[in-house]
Image (tube, rainbow, N blue to C red):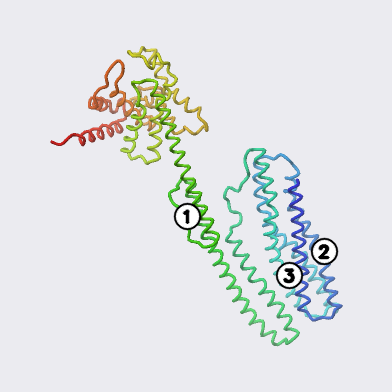
Amino acid sequence: MEAYRSFIFRLIRNYLIGSLAAVFVVGTVVMVSTLQIPNIQFVRLIFIVLISLLFMLVAELITLWVQLGPIRQFFTSEHHERDELNHMYEKIHRFPGQTIYRIMGPHMLGFSLPAAGLTLWMISTGWLEFPYFYTVVAAACAFLIAIMHALIEYYLTVRAIRPLLLEIRHRGKVQYGMEPSLGGRILVSIQRKFQLSTALIGLFPLFLFFLATYIRLQYMDSEFAKEYILWGILIVVLGAGFALVGSWLLIRDVRDPVAELTHEMNRIQGGDLGRRAPDLYADEFSALISGFNMMINRLEMRQERNRQLLQSYFSTLAAALDARDKYTAGHSMRVAEYSLMIGKLSGMNEEQADLLYKSALLHDIGKIGIPDEVLLKDGKLSDEEFAIIQTHPVQGESILLQIEPIDAMADFLPGVRSHHERYDGKGYPDGMAGDEIPLFGRIIAVADAFDAMTSDRPYRNGMSHEKALTILEEGKGTQWDPYFAGLFIDEWRRQQHLQKPSK
């Protein structure tokens, strides 16, 4: 609630200062320096200003009270739903825009209508002695002043709402462990703000000078004043064109680097850290882009370090598993290399090939849960013992599911669980067949079988590479995926042919 009270204090302070400055400082000074009327009529005009100011304050404060209603109700409660926090966070961001409508509506009309009515009445009664059309000029001046007041009030309100936004983010973090955010949505584009602001700043004094000078000339030479209108309109049009062109050039100078940084951030969000934002600027954007590129360098270094740590983690797991059995030492690493070769031959991209490699490193991780008397048995396994061995794909999946975060190992689970499935559906643990077997499982199955056949065991020596290739060839379409088995066989024989010494 303290943040809300501070916000109200700043809001009302800014509004009173802005209103008094707009009405008395700008409006009254222009009026006094322009009109040439007796002092008693100036007193009557000041009276009109004070009465109109009272109407304006009442109309605007009522509108402000209504606009603040939802915000006030929100901050009188301590606990809120998550959606309510997000909704109020956005609503407060929109509040500066409501300030513009409030000033251009109740503020301006609350002052202008009573002022115009009282002025026309006093002119009709003879209490004020100047032409009726001066009220039209005064209304135009009031409109210009209201626009500038709205512009200033908008930027002051943008600053005034910041404590409220910080308070909502604090509540979201405390209550739900999250901080409300717009999520990158743009409620008011910087291009629109810059164009309108710079154009109005350039046009306001020009229009005000044109109107004040016209009234002043009426007292000096009414005929020249008529000629002045056409000349003044021409100058105003040229000034307006200059202000609009200048605002367009300024916003382009700001928009381009912002657009480049936004594009680079979207690229990085997609995982591409390969490029850097071009530093083509000599102002503050140069420092911003330099810091941005430095951040990318740090991210790239951290990503590479994490990649190396993760690769080391997988290799360590595989080595720890292989260390249980001296006869299978290096098995996981060789299966990973064979799987990677098949993946690249099939046209996998780098990301998929890396996932395949890591899946193959972990394919036998479930054997950690197999008892030594079964896993390290020298002789042939009994049916019961073989049934225990057949549980290792499921145990491997269960082990990986224990790693946090829950989705960290999601890409590796299919290959670990399905690397003993057969293409004809007679494998385990799920009896899947053909293309319903996960891609990584079909590839690892070929690599795993080849290394198992060519490695020594306590009860047998490993067979020759050619004999293992022949068995793979015979098992294409029944035990192994014919496409991946064929790729492996052809590539292995091609490499063997290249290694043969020429005669």
Where residue 203 sits, quadrant-wise, is: bottom right
Relative horizontal placement of residue 396, taking residue 285 as reference (left or right): left
Q: Are marks 2 and 1 in contact (CB under 8 Å)?
A: no
Residue bearing the label numbered 2: 54
Q: Residue at x 64, y 45 (%)?
A: 86
Counting from the top left corner in percent of width and height, residue 145 is at 71, 68
Foreground pick, 200 / 310: 310
Check disc 2 and report its element: helix, strand or loop: helix
* Numbered mark located on residue 142 in the image: 3
Query: In the image, what residue type sits under mark 1?
Result: Ala
Mark closer to the chain start, 3 or 1: 3
State which quadrant residue 494 falls in.
Answer: top left
Q: Amino acid at mark 2?
A: Leu
Give me the disc on residue 277: 1
Q: Earlier in the sequence, mark 2 or mark 1?
A: 2
Residue 334 x %, y %: 33, 29
Of circles 3 and 1, the one toward us is 1
Q: Is residue 119 toward the left or the right of residue 344 in the image? A: right
Residue 436 visible to an observer of this rendering: no
Give the CA separation, mark 2 to mark 1. Answer: 55 Å
Helix, strand or loop status at disc 1? loop
